[in-house]
């Protein structure tokens, strides 16, 4: 691991500068938080899994023409990324009802949604990442109406590519969160990570409703076997990447 001074430390990753001002190093930690950091812990080996899974999925998306911040993976838990100015929106895409959607709307967990739902939350821990409306986003001047439309269309495209990839891994993509940023040239790039921390993933080879959970819900709900579930995601994703590349 690098000994350079940190540029930024978040809940799951540390960002370090490199000799090139346009390139940053993203270090994936084992620290885990849930419920806006009210629940804290560690998932052994999580940094390695999330770095490997994110690297694989960024490569898959790049191969489909989606611009991402990913450059390369340089160690088990470090990747080089383009520096981007993060747009303070958490873009959540849902295919199946779970989590806060069920709590807030009363819809049954596991219901297949009639269309993929794209939601925008304000990326602000102090405010508890509130759900935004289109008008609130425009009022806050986070992005323009055109940019919002592009974000939504890009998120839906990414959803289709990820559903396709995870299906090949016999994993159902229930929902997930994306973050985007603007690079030096003002181009929109997918940033952050795509991992069992940021996706709900259900094992298609399992029928038991608890047994099939392969993501951070195992940690959130104290279901046990968190590490082995994460490992299983990594194994299947890496195997699939090697098949298609
Ligand atoms: N999510 C995330 N970071 C957040 C909030 C949500 O990665 O700060 C992911 C979460 O893992 C799930 C999806 O976004 O895959 C939808 O989460 P939801 O709104 O249901 O919230 P939760 O139930 O996690 O509170």
Image (spheres, rainbow, N blue to C red):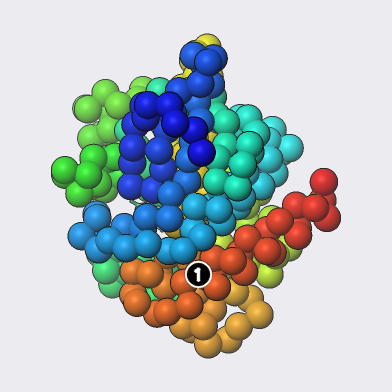
Q: Position of residue 4 (x, y in %)?
A: 43, 26
Left or right for 226, reference 220: right
Crowd rating for badge 1 (residues with CA inside 10 Å; few <14, some 14–19, many 20+) = some
Assign a secondary structure to mark 1. helix
Task: Name the residue located 33 percent from the left edge and 75 percent from the top edge.
Answer: 221
Among all residues in the image, which is located at the extreme front?
3
Q: Position of residue 233 (x, y in %)?
A: 61, 64
Q: Position of residue 210 (x, y in %)?
A: 46, 82
Tell me if I can see residue 105 in this picture: no
Against 206, residue 242 (above or below) is: above
Quarter-of-image position of residue 89:
top left
Q: In the rendered image, which residue does mark 1 sit on?
A: 227
In-front residue for pair 87/126 = 126
Left or right for 7, reference 21: left
Quarter-of-image position of residue 148:
top left
Left or right for 109, reference 67: left
């Amino acid at each position: 691991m690098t000994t350079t001074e940190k540029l930024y430390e978040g809940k799951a990753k540390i960002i370090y500068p490199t000799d090139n001002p346009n390139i940053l190093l993203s270090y994936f930690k084992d620290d885990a938080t849930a419920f806006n950091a009210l629940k804290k812990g560690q998932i052994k080996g999580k940094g390695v899994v999330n770095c490997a899974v994110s690297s694989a999925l960024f490569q898959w998306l790049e191969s489909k023409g989606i611009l991402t911040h990913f450059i390369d993976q340089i160690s088990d838990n470090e990747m080089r990324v383009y520096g981007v100015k993060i747009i303070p929106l958490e873009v959540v895409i849902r295919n199946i009802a779970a989590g806060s959607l069920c709590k807030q709307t009363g819809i049954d967990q596991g219901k297949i949604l009639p269309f993929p739902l794209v939601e925008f939350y304000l990326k602000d821990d102090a405010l508890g990442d509130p759900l935004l409306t289109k008008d609130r986003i425009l009022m806050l001047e986070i992005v323009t109406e055109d940019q919002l439309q592009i974000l939504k269309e890009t998120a839906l495209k990414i959803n289709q590519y990820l559903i396709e990839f995870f299906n090949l891994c016999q994993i159902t993509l229930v929902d997930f969160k994306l973050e985007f940023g603007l690079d030096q040239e003002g181009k929109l790039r997918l940033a952050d990570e795509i991992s069992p921390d940021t996706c709900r993933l259900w094992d298609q080879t399992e029928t038991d409703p608890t047994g099939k959970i392969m993501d951070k819900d195992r940690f959130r709900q104290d279901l046990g076997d968190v590490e082995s579930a994460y490992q299983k995601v990594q194994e299947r994703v890496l195997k699939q990447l090697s098949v298609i590349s």
